[in-house]
Image (cartoon, rainbow, N blue to C red):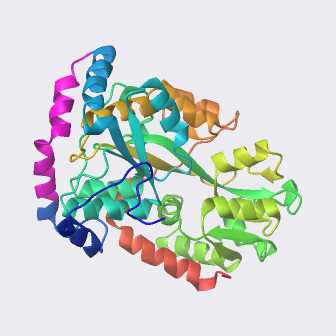
Amino acid sequence: MSPFYFPQRRVVVCAAALALLAAGCAAPGGDSEADSTQAANKCAGSATVKLQDTVKDKSAEEREAALLEQAKNTNGGTINLYTEVNDPTVITDPFEEKYGDLTVSVYRAGSEQIRERVLQESQANFAGADIIELDALEMAIINDNGLLAPSESPFLEGVTDSAKFGNFTGDRLSYIVPVWNTTIIPDPEAPQSFEDLANPRFKGKLALEGSDVFWFASMVNYLQTQGKSKDEAVQLFKDIAANSAITDGHTTTTDLVVAGQYGIAANNYIHRIRELQGKGAPLQFVPVKVPVVAEVTGIAVPCASANPAGALLLQDFILGPEGQQAFIDDDRTPSNEKMAEASFGGVDIEPIETDVEAISKEYSDWSDLWQSVIHSGGQG
């Protein structure tokens, strides 16, 4: 898919804007504090923030009615959603069914692609995304550039504290755990700790997904709270990588474990495991005996949204009970604290604490360190 392809619509961008878009954005986080300050000041007077001020004191019903009326009369009732989720129709279909006058136009790509696109469009003064959904690490980078309006919704109260950020809010969580194929690795031979993944008995059977910078950084920081030095924590990852084939993509990695190409994979999403278990796959991830990292996928409305009313309405829908239940129905974990308990099927999961914003500010260093880890001994 072209990075500038929009399903369901055509986009005309002036030649000057295209030239700016093509120039790219080399480094996460922007070029200077002045750029971030300028963007933040621009956001303060944006249509998005002005609309938030208009509806903030309304009841939930009055807010919904006001946003709907304005949304359907803006941009032809189209809301442009940039998202990393594999199947956006899980949310967009029930939303469009509920609000028949509105259409969600989806641009789907990886988190890094979305982040780069948003930054490039900002440089070109082009209002592309009305609402953005991507992982919190990339969202924090966009936020550092001052491009996001403050989080504001009547459904924020139900969101778990770990998913609340100033200008974006987690709408779903992805918990990362090892998974093994029980026909290759019987439960008694399963890992008993994270350190156990460095055991030579897993050599040639272990897969390690190679894009997980946030998981790696979170784990290294956590292991330091448990008595390891940073060097010792990184060396543990190098030892695990020496046992591992380096794979690309969480979905692909878990599928390869199902197929028996690998007996075990170190970093997999619980929602994908449970989905495959429901189809009869011989997978197991419990009891969970390793620290669990919860990746937060966030949602935010840009300051420059072309349809801020539609964006706020879609955000409310996603963070509200209908959207959160849609995630559960899709075997995903919603950010609503009470509803999240229903997504694990009774398995007790307590993720470790992570500092998303601190990791985002050191993203380049963590990424370089992760690359040195997976290239130090990984088998391909």
The verdict on residue 283 being magenta is: no
Residue at point 20% right, 38% down?
Answer: 48
Q: Residue at x 41, y 40 (%)?
A: 104
Q: Nearer the viewer, residue 76 or 270?
A: 76
In the image as oriented, which residue stretches furthest toward the bottom?
376
Residue 336 horizontal/vertical position (percent): 48, 31
Tell which of 375 and 82 is nearer to you: 82
Can residue 272 be seen by looking at this rendering?
Answer: yes
Is residue 118 found left or right of 135 in the rendered image?
left
Task: Say left or right for 28 vs 210.
Answer: left
Q: Nearer the viewer, residue 217 or 74?
A: 74
- Prevailing secondary structure of the magenta residues: helix
- Tell me if residue 111 comes above or below residue 326 in the rendering: below
Residue at x 77%, y 58% (from the top left corner) = 180
The percent coordinates of residue 39 (x first, y second) are 15, 55
Residue 24 appearing in the image = no
Tally of numbered tags: 0
Classify the position of the C terminus by image quarter: bottom right
Q: Which segment is the magenta one? A: 36-58
Picture layout, residue 245 above or below residue 226? below
Left or right? Give the position of 261 relative to 361: right
Q: Is residue 39 magenta?
A: yes
Vertical side of 370 occupied by 68: above or below: above
Q: Is residue 180 left or right of residue 214?
A: right
Tell me where residue 202 appears, x and y as whole percent: 78, 71
Nearer to me, 332 or 296: 332
